[in-house]
Image: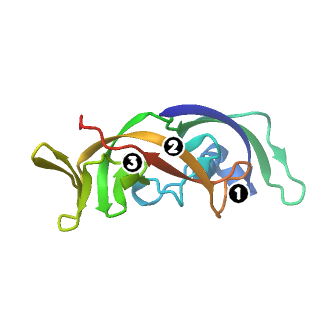
Amino acid sequence: MFKSFLVEDLITLEVAEYLDDARKSLTQKVEDKYVDRAGGGAFVADSSQILAGVGLVVLVQDFAFHCEPRILPNDASALFTLRLKLLVFAPERDEQLRGTVVGSDASGISVSLGFFSDIKIIPLFMPKNAAFDRDAKAWYTVQGDARRYYKNSAAIQFKVVEVTYNEVNGKGSGGCVEWQQTHRVTPPCRSC
């Protein structure tokens, strides 16, 4: 589910940033570029930094200077070459994940993993005995004579069927491309 990923990137600091505290300024710029958080520290697809074919950047674990910074002649800013070690959320096909129900409607169950809240379990991948209760505004499965509801805040386990990366317009992330990640998942497991 999580992987380390190494990347080399160029980060520019203005003179004031360089003279004040270069390491602090670099840390902030790297975090802003690679770990763009929406309010509350949760990731949402339209503001998350997803590296194409790699996954969602969760954390910058470490960075090191690759070489001495170059001073740019036009504005005297410093260009740093950094080697970054990124922690990336990269679910694999058929991987079992556990999350929390954050919403339900006729189109499916919305799930949060805590740090990422853009997962939807659609009816196509739910058990054949699943149905949506419009009055309760929740999905349920029938087990014997009883209905098991998947209400908000309930734990839910599911299997990743496919991970796709769809290009979106946005600020991008320099040498990398910003992507929106969507998940197709299989039915909730009965073990929850």
Q: Residue at x 44, y 40 (%)?
A: 160
Q: Quadrant of residue 170?
A: bottom right
Identify the secondary structure beneath mark 1: helix
Which mark's residue is nearer the viewer, 3 or 1?
A: 3
Mark 1 Cα-neighbour bin, 10 Å: few <14, some 14–19, many ≥20: few
Identify the secondary structure beneath mark 3: helix
Q: Which residue is mark 3?
A: 125
Q: Quadrant of residue 167?
A: bottom right
Q: Which residue is mark 2?
A: 162
Which of the marked residues, 1 or 2, is nearer the chain's N terminus?
1
- For residue 49, say whether it is visible: yes
Q: Which residue is mark 1?
A: 16
Find residue 190 and report its horizontal and vertical position in percent.
24, 37
Q: Amino acid at mark 3?
A: Phe
Which of the marked residues, 2 or 3, is nearer the chain's N terminus?
3
Residue 87 appears left or right of 7: left
Mark 3 Cα-neighbour bin, 10 Å: few <14, some 14–19, many ≥20: some
- What is the spatial separation of the Cα atoms under label 1 and label 2, in whole angstroms? 46 Å
- What is the spatial separation of the Cα atoms under label 3 and label 1, in whole angstroms? 54 Å
Find residue 31 and report its horizontal and vertical position in percent.
57, 48
